[in-house]
Image (spheres, rainbow, N blue to C red):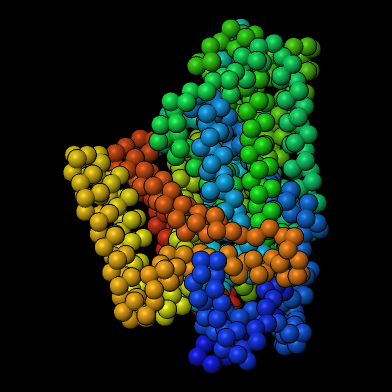
C-alpha cells in the first residue's frame, strides 16, 4: 500500500508498511476534479490534501514490506468476539465492583446515572474509538501510531506511547498486589472456619483479619519492618499467570479471555440470583438506586466523579486499546466495537451494584447493622464488608465457603484480565521503541514480568497499602488524565498543523492557537488555582472580564489575518482553524474502515469530532485543575513531603516521555519513509 501526497504538482509516494488504508484513487487530469465542497459548503482543494491510493504492486515493493505484512497477518484475534471479550475484560475490573456502586450510593442513588451515561457518550466512547482506530488503522500501538499521526505536523509525539507504557507499568505493579490479596482470601475460603466470620454482628474480626493478619499494616508510611510472605508468594503467582496468559501471543490470549471474562459473568449472575433472594436484599437495593436526590445534579463533584469513572474505567490512555486494536484488520467495525465495549462495561458496573448492595442489605438486616457503619467502597468493601456478609449466609457452614470461593475467584479473574492487558500494552509499545526493538517479544514479555514482580515487592511490605494508595492516586488521577488530555489535544490542535498553517497563514495560525485554546486552558487552571487564595470577585473579573474578551479578540485577529494573507472567507478560516484537524482525523479513519466498498461499518461523525476537539480536552483540563487545586490545599492522604514528591515524579516522567521525541525523534522505531505526512 502507499499513500500519495500531492502538493504544487509534486507527488511524493511513500509506503505505510501496513495492510490497511487504501481507498481512493484520485484522477488529477482536470483541476475541476480537485475542487470539492464539504457539507458546510466550504471548498476544499484536494490537490493540497492527502490522496489515499493503492495498487497491487504496493504490496510487494520490498522484501521488508512483505515480512512486515506477514508478521501482522500472523498476529490476529481469532474472532471479533474474542477481541471484544478481551477489550471488555481490560475495561471491566475491580473498580466496577468496588468503586462504581459506591459512587451511585454516595450521590443519592440512580441520579448518578445521568452524568455517568452522559460522560460515557461524550468521553468514553470517543476515547475508545480514537485509541482503537489508531491501533487498527495504522496496525501499530500508540508509539508508532502517534508517530505516523503527528509527523504531518512537523512534530513527533510518539513519546506519548512511551508515557502510556510507563503509566501502565506503574499501575500494573500495584494492581497485581490487589489481585494477590484476592488469591490469599481465595485460599483461606477453603478453611473450615472462615477467618473473617462475624462474631455476634461485630465487624472487628473481618477488619482485623484484613488489616493485621493479611496486610500486617504498620502505623504509618514511614515505619516499615517486614515483607508479608504470603502476599509476596501470591504476587509471584499473579505475575506467573500474567506471563502465561500472553506468552503464546494474541491468538492464545483470545482463548484465555473466554475463561477470564465469561467466568466472572456466570459467577456474577449466580451471586446476583442468590443475593436478591435473601432477606433484606430490597433494603440494600433501595440504598443503591431507590433514592433519586435530584438536587445532587447541582453538585460539581458528582459530575467530576462520573467523568473520572468513565475516563479511568475504560482502560484508555494506557496503551492497551491501541495495542489490542492493531491485531484487528484495518477495516474492522471499530466505532461499533467501541460502543459495544463501553456499553458492556456500563452494564457490568450496573449489575455489580445489585450484587454488592443485595448482600449488604442482607447483612444489615440479619445483623442489625446500620448502613453508615459499613465500608461501602474500595478495598474495605471487597475484603471486609462483603466477605463478612458472605460468612453469615443462610444454610450449613460450607455454603458460606462456596460463595466466598466464587466471589474471590471472580475477583481474581476480573483482575487478571486487566493485569495481562496492561502488560500487553507495555510490550506492544516497547516493541516500537528503537532501544527495545532489538529484543524479541518473548524477551520483552519475560523482562517486563520479572521487573514488575520485583517492583511489586514494595507493596508487599507492611507499608504497601499506603504506597499503593499514594501511587494509585498520582498515576490514575494525574498521569492517566494527563494522557487523555494530551491525546485529544494532539488530535484536535497539533495534528495537521503544517497543512492548516499553509492554508490560513502563520500569523492567523499562531494567534488562534495561542490566544484561543491556549488561553482557554490557562484560564481554567488560573480560575481553580486562584479561587482558594483570591477573592472570587477578582477571579471572576480576571477570567470573564479579561480572559474571555482576549480570546474573542484573538479569534477576530486570526480571521482578519487569514483573510488578508490567504484570501479565505470567515467560514473557511473558522473551518481550518477550529474544525479541520479533528474532522480530518475522523475522515481518514472512515476511509480505512470502509475499504471493502460497503457502507455497513459505522463511521466517526461530527459529534466525535466535536467531543475530541472541544469536550474531552476541556473536561480533562478541569479535572486536572481540580486535582492540582486539591493538592495545593491539602497534600494527598496527609503523607509526608518526600512521598508527595515521589508521586509527583510520576507525572513529571509522563510529561518528559511525551516530549522526548520532540527533541529526539529517532528514539522511536520506524523508518523515515514510514513516518512522513500522510493525512
Quick check: can you spot residue 559?
yes
Please name the residue shown 35% across and 66% down the image: 513
Percent position (x, y) of residue 494?
Answer: 44, 68
Percent position (x, y) of residue 650?
Answer: 43, 53
Please name the residue shown 61% across and 14% down the image: 283
With respect to residue 407, does 76 lie above or below?
below
- Name the foreground residue: 185 vs 291: 291
Quick check: can you spot residue 430?
no
Left or right for 104, reference 651:
right
* Quarter of the picture holding the C terminus: bottom right
Question: How many numbered discs?
Answer: 0
Q: Quadrant of residue 74?
A: bottom right
Please name the residue shown 43% across and 48% down the image: 619
With respect to residue 93, does 482 lie above or below?
below
Left or right for 485, reference 564:
right
- Name the foreground residue: 454 vs 70: 70
* Quarter of the picture holding the N terminus: bottom right
- Name the foreground residue: 601 vs 434: 601
Percent position (x, y) of residue 325?
Answer: 67, 60
Please name the residue shown 68% across and 51% down the image: 87
Q: Quadrant of residue 95?
A: top right
Q: Quadrant of residue 414?
A: top right
With respect to residue 649, does 104 lie above or below?
above
Percent position (x, y) of residue 190?
Answer: 75, 25
Amino acid at each position: 500500500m502507499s499513500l500519495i501526497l500531492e502538493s504544487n504538482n509534486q507527488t511524493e509516494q511513500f509506503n505505510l508498511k501496513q495492510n490497511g488504508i487504501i481507498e481512493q484513487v484520485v484522477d488529477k487530469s482536470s483541476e475541476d476534479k480537485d475542487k470539492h465542497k464539504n457539507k458546510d459548503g466550504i471548498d476544499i482543494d484536494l490537490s493540497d490534501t492527502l490522496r489515499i491510493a493503492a495498487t497491487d504492486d504496493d504490496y510487494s515493493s520490498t522484501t521488508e514490506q512483505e515480512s512486515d505484512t506477514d508478521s501482522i497477518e500472523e498476529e490476529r484475534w481469532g474472532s471479533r468476539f474474542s477481541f471484544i471479550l478481551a477489550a471488555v475484560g481490560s475495561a471491566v475490573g475491580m473498580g466496577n465492583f468496588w468503586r462504581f456502586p459506591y459512587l451511585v450510593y454516595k450521590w443519592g442513588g440512580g441520579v448518578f446515572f445521568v452524568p455517568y451515561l452522559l460522560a460515557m457518550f461524550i468521553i468514553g466512547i470517543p476515547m475508545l474509538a480514537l485509541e482503537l482506530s489508531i491501533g487498527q488503522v495504522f496496525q501499530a500501538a500508540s508509539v508508532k501510531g502517534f508517530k505516523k499521526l503527528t509527523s504531518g505536523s512537523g512534530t513527533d509525539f510518539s513519546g506519548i506511547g512511551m508515557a502510556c507504557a510507563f503509566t501502565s507499568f506503574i499501575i500494573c505493579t500495584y494492581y497485581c498486589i490487589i489481585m494477590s490479596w484476592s488469591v490469599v482470601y481465595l485460599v483461606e475460603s477453603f478453611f473450615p472456619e472462615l477467618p473473617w466470620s462475624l462474631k455476634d454482628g461485630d465487624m472487628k474480626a473481618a477488619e482485623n483479619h484484613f488489616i493485621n493478619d493479611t496486610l500486617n499494616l504498620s502505623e504509618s508510611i514511614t515505619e516499615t519492618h517486614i515483607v508479608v510472605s504470603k502476599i509476596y508468594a501470591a504476587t509471584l503467582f499473579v505475575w506467573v499467570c500474567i506471563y502465561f496468559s500472553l506468552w503464546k501471543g494474541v491468538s492464545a490470549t483470545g482463548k484465555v479471555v473466554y475463561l477470564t471474562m465469561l467466568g466472572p459473568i456466570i459467577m456474577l449472575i449466580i451471586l446476583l440470583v442468590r443475593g436478591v433472594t435473601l432477606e433484606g436484599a430490597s433494603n440494600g437495593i433501595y440504598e443503591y438506586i431507590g433514592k433519586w436526590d435530584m438536587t445532587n445534579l447541582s453538585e460539581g463533584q458528582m459530575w467530576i466523579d462520573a467523568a473520572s469513572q468513565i475516563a479511568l474505567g475504560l482502560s484508555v490512555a494506557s496503551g492497551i486499546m491501541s495495542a489490542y486494536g492493531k491485531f484487528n484488520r484495518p477495516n474492522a467495525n471499530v466505532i461499533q466495537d467501541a460502543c459495544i465495549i463501553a456499553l458492556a462495561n456500563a452494564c457490568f458496573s450496573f449489575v455489580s451494584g445489585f450484587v454488592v448492595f443485595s448482600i449488604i442489605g442482607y447483612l444489615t438486616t440479619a445483623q442489625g447493622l446500620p448502613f453508615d457503619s459499613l465500608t461501602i467502597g474500595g478495598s474495605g468493601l471487597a475484603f471486609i464488608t462483603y466477605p463478612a456478609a458472605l460468612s453469615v449466609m443462610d444454610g450449613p457452614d460450607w455454603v458460606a465457603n462456596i460463595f466466598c470461593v466464587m466471589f474471590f475467584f471472580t475477583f481474581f479473574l476480573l483482575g487478571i484480565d486487566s493485569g495481562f492487558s496492561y502488560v500487553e500494552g507495555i510490550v506492544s509499545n516497547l516493541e516500537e521503541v528503537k532501544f527495545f526493538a532489538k529484543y524479541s517479544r518473548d524477551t520483552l514479555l519475560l523482562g517486563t514480568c520479572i521487573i514488575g514482580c520485583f517492583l511489586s515487592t514494595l507493596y508487599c511490605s507492611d507499608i504497601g497499602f499506603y504506597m499503593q494508595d499514594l501511587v494509585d492516586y498520582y498515576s490514575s488521577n494525574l498521569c492517566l488524565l494527563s494522557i487523555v488530555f494530551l491525546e485529544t489535544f494532539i488530535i484536535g490542535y497539533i495534528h495537521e498543523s503544517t497543512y492548516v498553517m499553509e492554508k490560513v497563514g502563520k500569523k492567523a495560525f499562531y494567534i488562534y492557537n495561542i490566544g484561543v485554546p491556549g488561553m482557554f486552558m490557562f484560564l481554567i487552571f488560573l480560575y481553580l488555582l486562584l479561587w482558594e487564595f483570591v477573592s472570587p470577585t477578582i477571579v471572576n473579573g480576571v477570567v470573564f472580564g479579561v480572559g474571555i474578551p482576549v480570546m474573542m479578540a484573538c479569534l477576530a485577529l486570526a480571521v482578519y489575518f487569514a483573510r488578508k494573507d490567504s484570501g479565505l472567507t470567515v467560514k473557511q478560516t473558522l473551518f481550518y482553524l477550529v474544525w479541520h484537524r479533528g474532522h480530518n482525523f475522523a475522515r481518514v479513519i472512515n476511509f480505512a474502515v470502509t475499504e471493502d466498498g460497503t457502507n455497513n461499518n459505522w463511521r466517526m461523525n461530527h459529534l466525535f469530532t466535536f467531543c475530541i476537539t472541544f469536550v474531552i480536552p476541556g473536561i480533562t483540563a478541569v479535572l486536572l485543575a481540580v486535582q492540582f487545586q486539591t493538592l495545593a490545599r491539602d497534600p494527598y492522604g496527609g503523607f509526608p513531603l518526600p512521598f508527595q514528591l515521589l508521586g509527583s515524579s510520576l507525572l513529571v516522567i509522563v510529561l518528559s516521555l511525551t516530549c522526548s521525541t520532540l527533541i529526539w525523534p529517532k528514539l522511536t522505531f520506524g523508518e523515515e519513509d514510514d513516518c512522513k505526512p500522510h493525512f
